[in-house]
Every structure is written in C-alpha cells, then in structure tokens.
Amino acid sequence: MKKYTKLAGLCFFLIIGPLLAFAEVRTMGKAWWEASRQSSGVSPSPDEVKNAVIQVFAARAFSWRGIFGVHTWIAVKPTNASEYTVYQLVGWRLRRGEDPVVIERDIPDRLWYDATPELLVDVRGEGVDELIKKIDKAAKTYPYRNTYSVWPGPNSNTFVAWIGRLVPELRLDLPPTAIGKDWLGKTKFFSSNTSGTGYQFSFLGILGILLGVEEGLEINILGLNFGIDVLDMSLRLPGVGRLGVPRTIGPRAL
C-alpha cells in the first residue's frame, strides 16, 4: 500500500505543475496567424544603446505545448549595430525541408505567439562583441539540426543550451520548463551545465540530475524537471517553472 501511495504522490508532483500552467496558456484552440508577434518592449533600442548587447529570452510555447514548456532564443546586437540578430531553432522548418536553425535580423523581444517573453540574460558593454562571435560560431556548429523532437529533445531549447555550454560567460540559467535543455545526445551522458557553474548527468533527456551554483539542485524525471535553488530561494517545478522570491534580470557587464 505504501508503494502505491508513494507512486501516486510522485505522479501528482509531476503533473500538478503542468495543470497549473494550463491557466497561463492563452493560445489553446487559437490559430498561429491570429497570435501577436509584436515587441514586448524589453530590449533597448539600438538608437539609444550603442554598446554591444546579448539577451536570452524564454516564452511559453504555442498552444498545448505551452502547458509543459517554453521556447527560448538569443538576441544579439554588436557595438554600434543598427539592428539585432536573433538566433533560434524552429522545428516546423525542418518538416518543410528547411534549415531549422534561424539566424536573422529581427525584433529581439517579440511575443512568442501571444506569450510574453521572460528575460533570462542581459549582458552589455566591453567584451560582449567577442561573446557574440562565440555565439555565432556555436550556433553554426549545432550538431542536431537534422533532428527535432518536442519531447525530450533535441529541440529549440537544446539549441540554446548547446550555445550556453559553449559560451559559459553568459551564465545561462535555463528554466526547468525548457524541456530539451538536458538532451546531450544519444551517447553523451555527462556535461557541464548551461550556466557553466556546475555539472549534470542526463540519460537521453528523460532521466538525470544537475547541480550548479546558478541552478541549484535539479532532478529530471521523464523530461520534467524539479528542484531547489538555494541561491535564489526558489523551487524549480515542472510546468510552473521558477517559484519563489521574485527576481529582476538587469543589464550586467562581463
């Protein structure tokens, strides 16, 4: 009886987050062309900020996918550039025989089909131009561009996580709702984490454990992540994401 009680408790813990997240998803039953892609107003205008800028965003995925996870992307602006360049992976492009890795000049802080983006990283100033070159190189060497899977990866979050591991200066702490971030490949099971402040074990993105200064302790069961971040005094829950003391991501120098 105790065994079944523990199993029921585990199942409840894994699904309560997605159930709560259901209330946040605004695009259920909505056509993608009806959803907004306007700027959220987070990124500084290139006319006002001449310094180099790197920002990383996460927003609830479109439709039912948003119950479980987010879509992430990176926006960069070199010193004195008049536009931003956005790096992201878009799965439907692969189904159409196109390259899913998208590198293009675009509005950096667009709503992701009605979903307001959350700012994860905001780095500006001296030394950032060199990081932009590293991001560009990492994006162009992404090894899974011919494979896409919503769960457990590789997907858009696997792409951003790949860049984060190769550019640890970003200290990129991807949320637990970034399903696919823990996909390390079919034959690789150990790696540094995306923030560059710790390490992780992951078996095909469906079972693993992560320990880092930025992320705290995180456990992955069936691609759903939960844990505790002592540094930020918060819980990391599947579906919900980060739950705890509110934090503000402001511009920082390297």
Image (tube, rainbow, N blue to C red):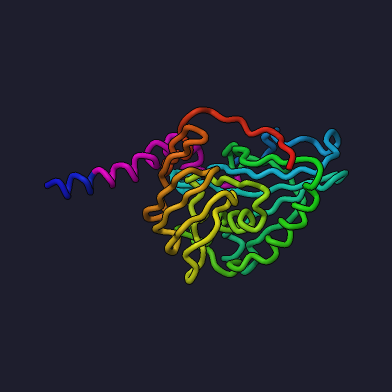
Q: Residue at x 43, y 34 (%)?
A: 23
**Position of 1 compared to 246: left or right?**
left
Identify the magenta region.
Answer: 9-33
Q: Is the magenta region chiefly helix, strand or loop?
A: helix
User: Observer-nearest residue: 240 or 79?
Assistant: 79
Please count the marks in the image.
Answer: 0
Relative image position of residue 145 (x, y in whole percent): 61, 66
Residue 48, placed above or below residue 123: above
Relative image position of residue 213 (x, y in whole percent): 53, 44
Residue 93, placed above or below residue 194: below
User: Observer-nearest residue: 69 or 223?
Assistant: 223
Relative image position of residue 103 (x, y in whole percent): 72, 57
- Residue 27 visible in the displayed image: yes
User: Observer-nearest residue: 7 or 193?
Assistant: 193
**Position of 138 compared to 204: left or right?**
right
Residue 87's quadrant in the figure? bottom right
Whether the magenta-drawn stretch holds residue 14 is answered as yes
**Position of 17 compared to 42: left or right?**
left
Q: Residue at x 83, y 39 (%)?
A: 46
Q: Residue at x 47, y 36 (%)?
A: 230
Residue 159's quadrant in the figure? bottom right
Relative image position of residue 12 (x, y in whole percent): 29, 42
- Residue 31 visible in the displayed image: no
Residue occupying the far right of the picture:
80
Whether the magenta-drawn stretch holds residue 185 is answered as no
Q: Residue at x 67, y 66 (%)?
A: 141
Residue occupying the far left of the picture:
1
Residue occupying the far top of the picture:
245
Of the 4 image quadrants, the one containing the C terminus is: top right
